[in-house]
Image (cartoon, helix red, strand yellow):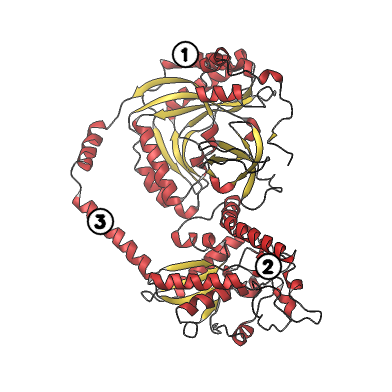
C-alpha cells in the first residue's frame, strides 16, 4: 500500500479546491440531493470529475399503513428466518431496471417522470390488488389484471420519454409485476414465511409513489459496510472512520489485508485504505442509494378499515388473556427445552504453532528426532505417536498458555454452577486436550469419557496440504492418559473427511454431527460440552437454533473477527520471543 490514503483515482483536478462555496451547492440541492450528500461531493470526493455515470432505476413504492405492515414483516422474517435477498432492498415493485444516464441529462429524467405520471394519473387504479404467491425460493405479492396493465403502461411511457429527453436506453418491466417479500431463502423456512406473509392485509390503505433512485455503478458487486465506531488511523495507509460512514469492500481484492482487517473505499471521502473489520457491520445493498424525484399517485381506500380498526383497538386496549396465556406457555416450554438440552460449544485453547509459527516443530526437535522444551510456552512434553514426532506438524498441541486458558475456562464454568453430563471433541489434539483440562477442573477427567467426533473438525479447505491431518488414534490417546470413549460411533468417521471440501459439505457435516450428538444424549441430565474450533461457534450452533448457514463470505468474515484479539496477543508474544532471542 502506498504511503497516505491511496485515492481511488490518481487524477484529482485543482478545481476541487473551494467547492464548498454555497452557490455551487444550490444546483445539487435543487436536483434533490440531500445537503450532506451535496457537501460531500463538493468537498471530499476525489473521483467527482471522472466520467462515470450513475445507474438509475424506477420503483413503485408503497407508503402508509401497508408499508408499515411490510416493514414489520421484514423485521420478523429476518429475526425468525435469518436474512435473505429481499432484505437488501426496501419494499417495492420494479418498473424499470437499472440504466445509465449522463450527469448533465439527469434533469430530463425528472421531466420524463412527471410527464409519464401526469398522463397516467387519471387512469391509475384507486386500489392495487395484491395476490400472495409462494414457491420454494420466492415469496411475494403479484399484481394482476387491468391494474397491472396500467402500471406497465406508465413504465413504458417513462422509458419512452427518458429515451427522447435524456438520450438513454431504459428497459421497462413488461413481465409479471411483483412486490418481493422473501427471495433465496432456505426451503425449511417457507412455511414460517408464508404464515408471516398472511398477516399482511393487502387491503390496507396505501399511497403508491413512483421513485427514481441512483447508485454508483463502480460498487455494484462490492460488499457495503456501515461504520459503527470512530477510528483514528494509526498508520498512513488506514482510513479515518466516523459512525454512519459507508465503506465499499471488494471481496476479491483482500490479499494484502491482515486477519481482522479489510481494504475498502470510503463513500464519504472516496479514499481507499485499510480499516478494522470489527468496527463495521454489513449494510443493506440499498443503504447507499440516492433517492431523487418522486411522483405520488392517489391514496387507495382501506377496504376493511372499520373491521381492522376495531380489532386493533381490542388488541391495543385490554390485553387478550387467552393469547397472553398461550404466549407465556410457549415461552416456558421453550425455556424448559433449552434447559433439558443445553449445549455448550467451546473453542480450543492457544495452539503452539500460533505462537511460534509453522516451523515450531523444528525449534523443539533435536537432531536425533527427540522433543525438548526451548521456551516455557512450549508444552512440557508431547504424547507418543506411532509415526513419530512429525505428525504433530499438522496436528499441533496446546501451548503452556493454552493449557492455562483451558483450566481457567473450566474453573469459570465450575463457578457458574453448570453440570457437565457428556463431552464431545474434534479429533484434533488441541481440542481433546482442551476437553481434558476443562473436565479436570470439575474433577471429572476420570469419570466422563471424551467422545471423539471427526464431524466437528475444522473446514478442511483451510488445512494446509492436499490431505487431511493425521490424528492420534483412540488407542494412542488412551495411552497418553486421555479418557476417550472406544465405543462411540461418530456421525462422520475419520475416513469420511475429504481434503478441500466445499463449504456446503462442511456445513452439512457439522449439522449432521450436531444432530447425532444431541440425539445420543439423554435429557435432563446436564450440559453437553462440545469442544471444537473457532468456526464451530457458528457452524455447530446454527443448526440447533434452526438458522440457515451463513453465506461463505460472511462465515469467513465472522471467523476472522473471532481471531482478531487472538492474533493481537500472538503478535505480542512473538515480539517478546524476538526480544528474548536478541
Report the side of 81 relative to 239 (left or right).
left
Residue 220, percent across and down?
62, 35
Report the side of 135 relative to 555 (left or right).
left
Q: Is residue 381 visible from the viewing direction of this image?
A: yes
In 3D space, how far apart are the residues under numbered discs 1 and 2 (Cα atoms)? 72 Å
In 3D space, how far apart are the residues under numbered discs 1 and 3 (Cα atoms)? 53 Å
**Within-10-Å neighbours for mark 3: few <14, some 14–19, many 20+:** few
Q: Is residue 453 visible from the viewing direction of this image?
A: no
Q: Quadrant location of residue 295? A: top left
Q: Nearer the viewer, residue 38 or 87?
A: 38
User: Label 1, on which residue?
Assistant: 119
- Residue 94 to residue 293: above or below: below
Element marked by disc 1? helix
Element marked by disc 2? helix
Q: Nearer the viewer, residue 486 or 472?
A: 472
User: Label 2, on which residue?
Assistant: 353
- Earlier sequence position, callout 1 versus callout 2: 1
Name which residue lies at 54% across and 33% down: 288
User: Label 3, on which residue?
Assistant: 326
Q: Quadrant location of residue 15? A: top right
- Pointer 2 and pointer 3: residues touching (CB < 8 Å)? no
Residue 479, percent across and down?
62, 87
Amino acid at each position: 500500500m502506498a504511503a497516505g490514503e491511496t485515492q481511488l483515482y490518481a487524477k484529482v483536478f485543482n478545481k476541487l479546491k473551494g467547492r464548498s462555496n454555497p452557490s455551487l451547492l444550490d444546483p445539487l440541492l435543487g436536483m434533490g440531493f440531500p445537503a450532506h450528500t451535496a457537501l460531500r461531493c463538493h468537498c471530499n470526493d476525489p473521483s467527482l470529475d471522472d466520467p462515470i455515470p450513475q445507474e438509475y432505476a424506477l420503483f413503485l413504492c408503497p407508503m402508509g399503513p401497508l408499508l408499515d405492515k411490510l416493514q414489520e414483516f421484514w423485521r420478523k422474517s429476518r429475526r425468525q428466518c435469518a436474512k435473505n435477498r429481499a432484505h437488501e432492498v426496501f419494499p417495492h415493485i420494479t418498473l424499470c431496471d437499472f440504466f445509465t444516464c449522463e450527469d448533465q441529462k439527469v434533469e430530463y429524467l425528472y421531466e420524463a417522470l412527471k410527464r409519464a405520471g401526469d398522463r397516467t394519473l387519471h387512469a391509475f387504479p384507486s386500489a392495487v390488488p395484491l395476490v400472495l404467491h409462494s414457491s420454494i425460493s420466492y415469496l411475494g405479492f403479484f399484481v394482476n389484471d387491468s391494474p397491472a396493465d396500467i402500471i406497465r403502461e406508465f413504465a413504458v411511457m417513462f422509458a419512452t420519454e427518458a429515451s427522447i429527453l435524456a438520450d438513454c436506453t431504459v428497459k421497462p418491466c413488461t413481465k409479471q409485476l411483483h412486490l418481493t417479500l422473501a427471495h433465496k431463502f432456505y426451503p425449511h423456512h417457507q412455511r414460517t414465511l408464508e404464515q408471516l406473509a398472511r398477516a399482511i392485509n393487502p387491503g390496507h390503505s396505501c399511497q403508491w409513489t413512483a421513485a427514481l433512485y441512483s447508485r454508483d455503478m463502480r460498487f455494484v458487486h462490492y460488499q457495503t459496510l456501515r461504520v459503527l465506531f470512530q477510528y483514528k488511523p494509526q498508520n498512513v495507509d488506514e482510513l479515518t472512520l466516523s459512525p454512519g460512514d459507508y465503506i465499499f469492500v471488494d471481496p476479491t481484492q483482500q490479499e494484502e489485508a491482515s486477519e481482522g482487517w479489510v481494504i475498502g473505499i470510503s463513500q464519504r471521502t472516496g479514499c481507499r485504505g485499510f480499516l478494522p473489520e470489527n468496527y463495521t457491520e454489513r449494510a443493506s445493498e440499498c443503504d447507499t442509494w440516492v433517492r431523487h424525484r418522486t411522483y405520488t399517485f392517489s391514496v387507495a381506500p382501506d377496504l376493511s378499515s372499520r373491521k381492522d380498526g376495531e380489532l386493533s383497538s381490542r388488541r391495543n386496549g385490554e390485553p387478550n388473556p387467552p393469547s397472553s396465556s398461550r404466549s407465556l406457555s410457549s415461552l416456558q416450554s421453550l425455556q424448559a427445552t433449552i434447559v433439558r438440552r443445553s449445549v455448550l460449544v467451546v473453542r480450543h485453547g492457544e495452539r503452539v504453532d500460533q505462537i511460534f509459527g509453522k516451523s515450531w516443530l523444528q525449534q523443539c526437535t533435536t537432531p536425533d528426532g527427540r522433543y525438548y522444551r526451548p521456551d516455557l510456552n512450549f508444552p512440557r512434553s508431547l504424547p507418543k505417536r506411532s509415526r513419530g514426532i512429525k505428525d504433530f506438524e499438522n496436528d499441533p498441541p496446546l501451548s503452556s498458555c493454552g493449557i492455562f486458558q483451558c483450566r481457567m475456562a473450566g474453573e469459570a464454568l465450575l463457578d457458574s454452577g453448570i453440570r457437565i453430563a457428556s463431552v464431545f471433541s474434534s479429533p484434533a489434539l488441541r481440542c481433546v486436550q482442551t476437553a481434558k483440562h476443562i473436565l479436570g477442573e470439575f474433577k471429572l477427567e476420570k469419570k466422563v469419557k471424551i467422545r471423539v467426533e471427526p464431524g466437528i473438525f475444522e473446514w478442511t479447505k483451510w488445512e494446509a496440504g492436499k490431505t487431511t491431518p493425521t490424528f492420534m488414534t483412540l488407542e494412542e490417546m488412551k495411552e497418553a492418559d486421555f479418557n476417550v470413549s472406544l465405543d462411540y460411533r461418530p456421525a462422520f468417521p475419520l475416513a469420511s473427511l475429504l481434503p478441500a471440501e466445499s463449504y456446503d459439505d462442511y456445513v452439512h457435516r457439522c449439522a449432521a454431527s450436531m444432530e447425532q450428538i444431541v440425539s445420543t444424549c439423554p435429557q435432563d441430565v446436564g450440559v453437553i460440552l462440545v469442544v471444537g474450533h473457532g468456526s464451530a461457534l457458528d457452524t455447530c450452533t446454527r443448526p440447533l437454533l434452526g438458522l440457515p448457514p451463513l453465506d461463505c463470505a460472511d462465515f469467513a468474515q465472522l471467523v476472522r473477527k473471532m481471531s482478531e484479539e487472538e492474533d493481537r496477543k500472538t503478535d505480542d508474544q512473538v515480539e517478546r520471543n524476538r526480544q528474548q532471542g536478541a
